[in-house]
Image (spheres, grey):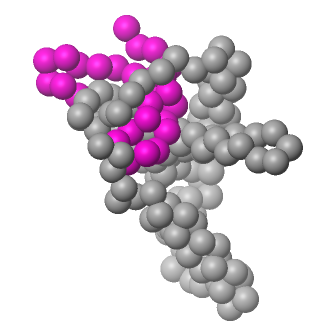
Amino acid sequence: MPEIKLIRLQSGEDVICTCYEDLETKMVMLKDPMTVIFKRIKNGSLLLISPWLPAELIENNTATIYTSDILTTVEPKLMIKNYYVKLVDNLEKFKKEEEETLRQFLEDDSEEGVYEDEEEDEEDEIESILELHGSKKNIRLH
């Protein structure tokens, strides 16, 4: 039976998703997986939940991983589960709205509306995201 779980992967990433485990194949299907970043800060804590996969670019927002890639699985608090369900619903609405925009972008051969300054800002933003993502990417906890 599928359940919403918080999974800590061997890489150290935390993912919240609806899980389907196949004991025979030792695989786990993650439906609507989202990265969870939790940081304790001076005046409390910070929680960031975002899609683990590029959901806007794929048909089915699922991934299958080996059970050996999972360090541990825990039950998230009810309020976190409810928030996750709301985010998944919002993501589905966003994907539908953005589908036409993406289609137009991919079919558009012209570079109209793209300015050099915007490109540099986007490149800087992409570089900082990749650095953050890369710092966790090849680390295994066990």
Is 47 drawn above or below residue 112 in the view shown?
above
Whether residue 112 is visible here, answered yes or no, is: no
Q: Magenta part mainly helix, strand or loop?
A: strand
Instruction: Tell me the residue at 48%/21% (across/down).
Output: 74
Residue 118 rendering spot, x and y as whole percentages: 71, 82
Corner quadrant of residue 123: bottom right
Residue 122 inside the magenta-drawn segment: no
Whether residue 121 is visible here, answered yes or no, is: yes
Which residue is at the front of the view, 67 or 102? Answer: 67
Q: Residue furthest top?
A: 1
Bounds of the magenta segment = 1-27
Residue 22 inside the magenta-drawn segment: yes
In the rendered view of the protein, which quadrant contains the C terminus?
top left
Is 1 drawn above or below residue 91 in the view shown?
above
The mark total stands at 0
Is 102 drawn above or below residue 18 in the view shown?
below
Residue 115 rendering spot, x and y as whole percentages: 71, 88
Q: Residue furthest left?
A: 24
In the rendered view of the protein, which quadrant contains the N terminus?
top left
Instruction: Tell me the residue at 28%/38% (across/down).
Output: 69
Corner quadrant of residue 105: bottom right
Residue 39 rendering spot, x and y as whole percentages: 67, 45
Which residue is at the front of the view, 35 or 63? Answer: 35
Which residue is at the front of the view, 110 or 94? Answer: 94
Q: Residue furthest right?
A: 43
Task: Please state if 46 lies on the left or on the right of 43 as rendered.
Answer: left
Instruction: Tell me the residue at 62%/51% (across/down).
Output: 98
Which residue is at the front of the view, 65 or 95? Answer: 65
Is 53 drawn above or below residue 130 in the view shown?
above
